[in-house]
Amino acid sequence: MAFIRKRRLERELYSKERFSLLLLNLEEYFFEQHTANHIKNKGCRDERKFRGSLKICSKSIIFEPDDNIQPIIKIPLRDCISIKAPEDNEAKNPFTRDTSGGISVVCNQVFLIKERNIIAPYKTVRGRTEHLFQLDVAGKLGDVVQTLHQLYRASCLDKMGDQAAMITAILQSRLARTSFDKNRFQSISETLHMECKAEMVTPLVTNPGHVCVTDANLYFQPLNGYPKPVVQITLQNVRRIYKRRHGLMPLGLEVFCTENDLCSDIYLKFYNYQDRDELYFLIATYIENHITEHTAESYMLQWQRGHISNYQYLLHLNNLADRSCNDLSQYPVFPWIIADYSSSVLDLTKPETFRDLSKPIGALNKERLDRLLTRYQEMPEPKFMYGSHYSSPGYVLFYLVRVAPEYMLCLQNGKFDHADRTFNSLAETWKNCLDGATDFKELIPEFYENDSSFLVNSLKLDLGKRQGGKMVDDVELPPWASGPDDFLQKSQEALESQYVSEHLHEWIDIIFGYKQKGSEAVAAHNVFHPLTYEGGVDLNRAITGIAVTCNGSSVFTTSQDSTLKMFSKESKTIQRSASFSNMALSSCLILPGDTTVISSSWDNHIYFYSIAFGRQQDILMGHDDAVSKICWRDRRLYSASWDSTVKVWHCAPGETLSSKKHHFELLAELEHEVSVNTINLNAANTILVSGTKEGTISVWDVTTATVLHQLPCHSGTVFDAAFSPDSRHLLSTGADCCFKVIDVQTGMLISSVTTDEPQRCFKWDGNTILSGSQSGELLIWDLLGGKVTERLKGHTGAVMSMWMNEQCNSVITGGEDKQIIFWKLQY
């Protein structure tokens, strides 16, 4: 088992250490470590010393005690108040205790990890505390303190982009000052062919260092000496080498010393593609002189002749499709084969025992497929049938949480998933993949291998208690399996059965072949969201939402590339970018106090993002389909969805500096007959307007959750709707190229203005309208006269979203042309 075996090898290699790179934040680097003592209660009668290792990382200080009973201490640099060494005169005072080599760190928050050597969610300790670390080598004190001050300054920068740039500069400076130690060569007779900087990639983390290629070996020397001084691979042992895309960039390279295995010997990410391609050429040339290269066609021929098994063929196809065990976003995918999880005996001679391999998971249940197809027909371009994918990092760790809990904690900010969403039962998981509104996941190769540990809670992890009160433990197996090993054996038999051998090519066509895209994908009901296809959607797609901080300095945008971006209004440059899922984000807003951004997503969820800490703070899974629009007023969150509802939530915010989550209470659910595309509230927060994809405008009394008026205003999707400042009138615009004005009290249509093209968004002061058009212009309208008074050239594609300040003189627009434009208006 590729992933599990790799984890086991890592544990054997680092058996004396509890620390791993998974304790770092995503995109954080581990720079150096020093043996030291952690001194508690300095100068007091109960003073204690704990021996261990002090790790200096780009965003945190980590102390790993030698005593496994004591927890690992992680101090985020952003939470530090001061970092200093004792004053010289204090250190030289003969009447004071020896503090040579001491570093004092005062902070307001620390994380405690692996207390009593138990893998569990991180504990957070809040409040001002001081930690004293005494280095074994006092002479290193000055350099360590200087490094910490430099990294601390980076963590205190206001702009995340500046933080990343400063840390990158520190890293590159360290790499430039060092080079590969030639004394690490296996033989003094080796000839150097190439040396460059690179990072070694493992799931969720990377480790920078130097790569060196000789005529006999490939070497990687980590900058920090972790996990060992040098990784060495003999070229004579190399069997396969693949170029990889890492972070959607052609910078990766993966090397295998085995023929029939998913577990590579090393995965490297380079800082430029020229270095990557040169190293690939050197190794590939060596391989060509020793080994025959295998192509997809050659593997297919071997499979057809029975020379390799179904499992081996799928393994090679995954490798050729750029899937790697080192990349959880591109982890190898294997099919669900068995469809029977209730019988006492598994009969592999009956076709009904097997899943229909000619269909994707989402098309196996006809009733669900019919609902998805109905939505697909109503959907604007780009259309898709399935909002979530058949493989993702969350799905991989869903299956592997029992053997890779630290990966789950790393991915989820130190927490496990909710007990009821954990991998509890094969039958439940299969049923949810058949019936669930958003669950279309396939399996991973571990289901067809020989290590059943991922099905057993051998680590005795506390994964929580389910709603019925039962603790999450081992995975519940089907009746026909006598145990985990028997389950895997029968799964292997099913994969290699005659039925699967005769039909496996149908599933391969769907996942790896000609039914992935285009008309064949549509015919096979195999259309996923465009973002799941490489090159399917421009990664800087049309902007869907804009929010601005109270002081106007920072602008947040959401877009169909699934990212939340923060721009500096002053410098007009991007400061940070965060991605929560593989689905489009549809809108965003900033909570009062400028501490949190909320964004809605097509993956049915609403995300809370901490501006101060630059990370996802919370998630609300409130709908059964895409969330199209959100509003926030007086601690109430209003969410509109394609599931034909608008929900009203009372939201009690979590503590900013803690791991406490927001508390959500559903106050009301406003039912519609079709998908809701937009919502808005009046100034008093008592009336809500909703617009549907079929053109209906509904006016709701939110105090009683009752509908006041329901009007078929537009002949197409309602794009935007808003109340006049006095709440007497309501304006809406739709795909039918019309503005409609409604009297809120009577529900009567007062006027209708026809436009030359659809107006996607607008701002309205009760008289004058500023709208964003399909062609990219900003139009100023005289509503009473029903005419355009001014046209402003703006975007080269449709204006998708618009923000305006209270004074109505500052406007920001976002368009299909991937641009945001800042405007000063005088009218």
Image: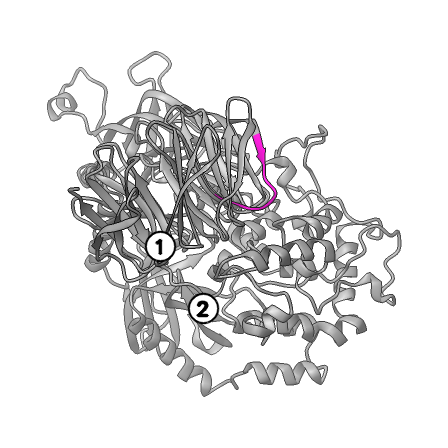
Q: Is residue 443 left or right of residue 538?
A: right
Q: Residue at x 28, y 30 (%)?
A: 134
Give how far apart the Cα atoms at labels 1 and 2 are.
56 Å
Helix, strand or loop status at disc 2: strand
Reply yes or no: does residue 676 show up in magenta: yes
In the rendered image, which quarter contains the N terminus? bottom right
Q: Which residue is mark 1?
A: 755
Which amino acid, mark 2? Answer: Glu
Which amino acid, mark 1? Answer: Thr
Reply yes or no: does residue 618 show up in magenta: no
- Whether residue 752 is situated above or below residue 766 in the rendered picture: below
Q: Is residue 414 left or right of residue 216?
A: right
Q: Residue at x 71, y 42 (%)?
A: 474
The label on residue 12 is none
- Whether residue 740 is situated above or below residue 497 in the rendered picture: above
| Residue 290 placement (x, y as % from top left) | 48, 86
In the rendered image, which quarter contains the C terminus? top left
In the image, 611 versus 56, the foreground residue is 611
Q: Is residue 493 left or right of residue 624?
A: right
Highlighted range, magenta: 669-677
The label on residue 254 is 2
Task: Kindly tell me whether residue 687 is visible in this rendering.
Answer: yes
Q: Is label 1 or label 2 in front?
A: 1
